[in-house]
Image: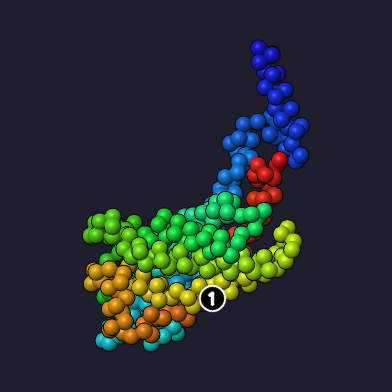
Amino acid sequence: MQATFIFPQLILLNRFSAMAKPIPMPFFQRPWMLQQGAAAAEGGNKGLKGILAGGITGGIEICITYPTEYIKTQLQLDEKGDRKRYSGVTDCIRKTVIQRGFFGLYRGLSVLLYGSIPKTASRFGAFETLKDHMADNGQLSIFSKLLCGLGAGICEAVIAVTPMETIKVKFINDQRTAKPQFKGFFHGVGRIICNDGIGGIYKGVTATILKQGSNQAIRFFVVESLKDSYKAKNPQKPVPKLLVGAFGFIAGAASVLCNTPLDVIKTRMQGLEAAKYRSTANCALKIWHNEGISAFYKGTVPRLSRVCLDVAFTFMIYDSFMDVFNRVWYTTDEIN
C-alpha cells in the first residue's frame, strides 16, 4: 500500500526536477492539475487563452459601444422616398430619445451581449490557434497575418455573427414599425424561428462571411504589422496598452473604409423585408439600381465611430487579459 503511494510521487518529483521553470507548490499536492487545470501544459492552451480572453473582452466592449451600433443599423435600414425617417445621425439620436428615452439607444443590446461573448471568443481563439501553427519563431509573414485574420473572421461569422446580427437587425427593424411584435429576446427569437424556421437566423450568411472575413483580415493585419514595426528587432518588447488601442483605432478605420458596402448589403439581407431579395448579389443590384452608389456607404459615420472605438477597446482589453493569463498559465513551450 505504501509502495503504490510513493512510486508515482517519485515519478512526479523526477519530472518536476527536469523542468526549468518551477511549478507552484499547490500542484505538488494536486498533480492532476498539470494535465487538466488552468496550469495544464498543452500547446493548445494558446487557443484556449484566446477563447477565454476574447469572451470576456466581447462582453465588456459591447456594453461600451452599443448605441453607435443601434444608430448605424437604423440609418442603413432607412430607404429613400416616403419611407425615409431620419435625415442623419443627430436626427436619429434625437427621435429615438424623444420616442423611447435614452435607453431606447440600447434596444436590442441583449441580442449582441449574448452573441458578442462567443463571437469575440471564437475570433481570438481561431486567430491564436492559426497563429500558433503558422508563426515562424513567433513571427507572422504578411500573407500569414492576412490568412489568420481571414480565418478568424470566417470562424466568428459562422459560429456567432450571422445568427446574432440577423436577430439584432430584426429587433431594431421591428422598432421601426407602428406596433412592434417582439416583447423580448427569447420571445423575439421564438417568433423569428416560428415564422422563418432555423434558417431565419442565418439570413445573409454569405454577406456576413465576406464582411467578417475581410474585416478581421484587415484588422489583424494592421494591428500585427504596427506591433511588429514598434518592436523593431526585439520580438519580446512589450507594447503599451494605449498604443495597442491606437493601433486598433487605425485598424478599425481601415476596415470600415474598405468594406462598408458589404455591411450595408448584409444589413438589408437580415432585415424584416429580406424576402424581397433573391440573393446577396440580387440585393446589391437592387440597392445600386434603386438608390445609387452612395447607398452602399449609408451609416458610415456612426459605423466609423463605433468600429474605431470597438476595435481599440477590444485589442486593449484582450491584450490586458492575455498578459494576465500568460503570467499565471504556462504552455508547454514556456515550461520546457
Q: Position of residue 229 (x, y in %)?
A: 68, 68
Task: Answer with left or right where residue 269 lies relative to residue 40.
Answer: left
Q: Nearer the viewer, residue 88 or 102?
A: 88
Task: Answer with left or right where residue 20 lies relative to residue 104.
Answer: right
Q: Position of residue 319 (x, y in %)?
A: 63, 59
The residue drawn where x is 28% and y is 84% is 290
In the displayed structure, would residue 283 be above or below residue 122? below
Q: Quadrant of residue 95?
A: bottom left
Task: Answer with left or right where residue 300 lies relative to residue 249.
Answer: left
Question: How is the model colour-coded?
Answer: rainbow
Q: Position of residue 193 (x, y in %)?
A: 27, 57
The quadrant of the picture occupied by the N terminus is: top right
Is residue 147 in sight in this rendering? yes
The residue drawn where x is 35% and y is 62% is 205
Q: Which residue is labeled 1 in the image?
A: 253
Q: Quadrant of residue 109?
A: bottom left
Q: Position of residue 19 (x, y in %)?
A: 74, 36
The quadrant of the picture occupied by the C terminus is: top right
Is residue 183 in sight in this rendering? no
What amino acid is labelled 1 in the image? Ala
